[in-house]
Image (cartoon, grey):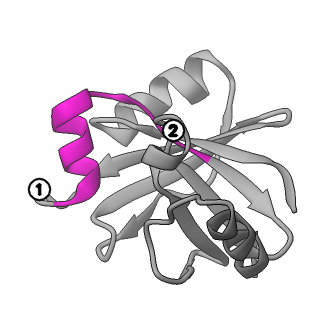
Amino acid sequence: MIKKINHVGIVVKNIEEALGLYVDILGFKQTEILTSKEDGIKTVMVSLNDVTLELMEPIDPQGGIQKFLESRGEGIHHISLEVDDINQERDSMTSKGIRLIEKKPRYFEGAWVSFVHPNSTRGVLMELIQWA
């Protein structure tokens, strides 16, 4: 079962510059900046009240986030939906004709994640997330 929107992922050219907007001007609180060489990104979560955004900067010139930035520019990348049971949610979605990007969930920074193909969700990339 989908519990809530966990966060919205936003691609930025430079995290430090983006933090100037979200933290210094808008008043969001930030977490530690993390680097994932496997995913080719630097990320940081920023939160204000019940709203959390994930800022993502590409570090791999051939990676998916870099390609997104080149083709679409900075902006919203995905909506993350927190679920109770990621495998059950994946099974339920696929039984209803929804296409998933990965064959199985993968572990990333304390959570299991899986992406739903935007062709199945009217052009919106969705991430399913279950905290470990």
Q: Residues within 10 Å of mark 1 (few under 14, many from 20)?
A: few
Outermost residue toward the left in this view:
61
- Whether residue 118 sits left or right of residue 7 in the image: it is left
Q: Considering only vertical position in the picture, is 53 above or below 85? A: above
Q: Is residue 82 above or below residue 88?
A: above
- Viewer-proximal residue among 97 and 48: 97
25 in relation to 89, above or below? above
Within 10 Å of disc 2 (Cα), the crowding (few <14, some 14-19, many 20+) is some
The amino acid pointed to by label 2 is Val
Say whether residue 82 is left or right of residue 77.
right
In the rendered view of the protein, which quadrant contains the C terminus? bottom right
Q: CA distance from mark 2 to mark 1?
A: 24 Å
Horizontally, is 61 left or right of 24 in the view? Answer: left
Q: Earlier in the sequence, mark 2 or mark 1?
A: 1
Secondary structure category for the residue under label 1: loop
Q: Which residues are magenta?
A: 63-79
Residue 79 spot, x, y in % from top left = 60, 43
Q: Which residue is mark 2?
A: 124
State the residue in front, 28 or 6: 6
| Residue 50 image position (x, y, % from top left) | 85, 36
Residue 61 disc label: 1
